[in-house]
Amino acid sequence: MPKIVQFTHPGHEHGPEKNNPNHKNWNAGAHKRKFLHATGRYVQGNQLHSGELLFWGEWEPPSVVNEFASRPTWFHPRWLHRPYLPEVIPDPHSDGASLQNTDPYVFDGPFKYAICKQFKSRTGRPTQLANLDRGSIVLFGSTGNQNKPNAFFQLDTVFVVGDYLEYDVSDPAPLSLPELRDYHTAVFQMAFPNPTKNSLKLRLYFGATYDNPFEGMYSFSPAQVFNGQSQGFPRVALKDLPYLTNNLNAAPKISGVSIDQSTIFWEEIRTISREQGCVEGVHYDFWRREELG
C-alpha cells in the first residue's frame, strides 16, 4: 500500500561564510535550506522545457552566494546559491567537523532519498520510511509560523517513489554503481563515514520522473524560471489539506492510501504549486566550479 508522508526538516536559510560574503563552504553544522539557482528541466503548460531555474532545496556541499537586492517578507530568501560539487570530495571529518549529507538529493538524474529518518539513531532499527511502496509520496518541507494559529507547511520537494534499491550500511556495495559515483561520495559517505559491521537495511529511493512517471505522477520541486530577477520567492504554502498537519513538529506524518487517493492528492499539490506561480522543476544539474568564476 502506498503512503503519503509529510516530512519536516529544518527550514532556516543558509547564508554565506562570515569571512566570505560570496561563498558557503561544505556545511558542517545543522541542516538548513538553500534558495538555489541551477540549470535543469521543467514542466510548464504540460510541456517539458530546459533552462535556468530557481528553487528551494537541500544542498550541503559548497555554493557561490549572492545577496538579493530585495526581500519583501521573512518567507522570501535573502541569499541566492549556485551549487557546485568540488572535484575532490573532502574527508567527512576534515577540520575536525562532520560534514553534512544532502537528503533528499534532487540533482544529477532522478531525485534520490536514502537516509534521513529511515532509522532511529537510539535503537538502530528501521522506521516505516525504510519500507515505502512505489507510488508513495513524500512531501519534504518545513513548518512556517510554527506553534502559531496561522502555521502552515512550506513545501520544497515532492518526491514520488518510482523505484528503490535496498542496501545495508554495513555493505554499501550496491551504491557503488558508476552512475551513483557522485551520490555515493557526496551523500552516503558523509552520512556513514566509518565502516560498520552493524547491519542496518535501508532503501535508496529513486523518484518517478517526467519521462518515467508512476501512474502519471512525477517528482518535482516548485521552481521559477530564472530571468535575472532581483528577488526570490517563498516556498509553496500548504494549509488545511488532507493527510497534512499545519503545525507539524519533527516526527513525520504517515498516511496509508490507495493509488487513486495518492494520484488525486498529487494532482492537488501540483495545482496549488502552479497557482502560487511555480513550474515543476523535474531535473537539476549542479554547476562546475570553473563556470562560476
Image (tube, rainbow, N blue to C red):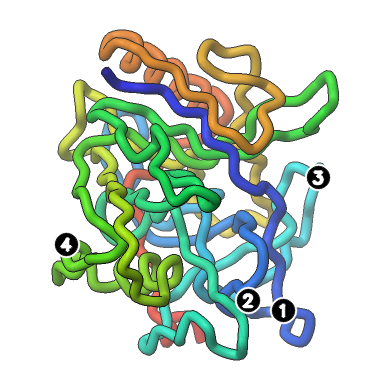
Quadrant in which residue 240 is drawn: top right
Residue position marked by numbered label 1 in the rendering: 17
Q: Which of marks 2 and 1 is nearer the N terminus?
A: 1
Q: Is mark 2 on a helix, strand or loop?
A: strand
Q: Residue 74 carries which label?
A: 3
In the displayed structure image, the side of residue 55 where residue 2 appears, left or right: left
Quadrant in which residue 256 is drawn: top left
Q: Which kind of residue does numbered mark 3 sit on?
A: Trp
Front-most of 142 and 285? 142
The alpha-carbon separation of the residues under discs 3 and 4 comes to 42 Å
For the residues carrying marks 2 and 3, which lies nearer the camera in this image? 2
Q: What element carries label 3?
A: loop
Q: Which kind of residue does numbered mark 2 sit on?
A: Lys
Q: Position of residue 95 (x, y in %)?
A: 60, 90
Front-most of 47 and 2? 2
The residue drawn where x is 66% and y is 28% is 248
The alpha-carbon separation of the residues under discs 2 and 1 comes to 5 Å
In the displayed structure image, the side of residue 197 where residue 146 appears, left or right: right
The alpha-carbon separation of the residues under discs 4 and 2 comes to 31 Å
Q: Residue 121 carries which label?
A: none
Q: In this view, does 119 lie above or below 85?
A: above
Is there a contact, CB below 8 Å, between mark 2 and mark 1?
yes
Residue position marked by numbered label 4 in the rendering: 174
In the displayed structure image, the side of residue 271 where residue 80 appears, left or right: right
The alpha-carbon separation of the residues under discs 2 and 3 comes to 21 Å
Q: Where is residue 34 in the image (x, y as percent from the top left)?
A: 60, 58
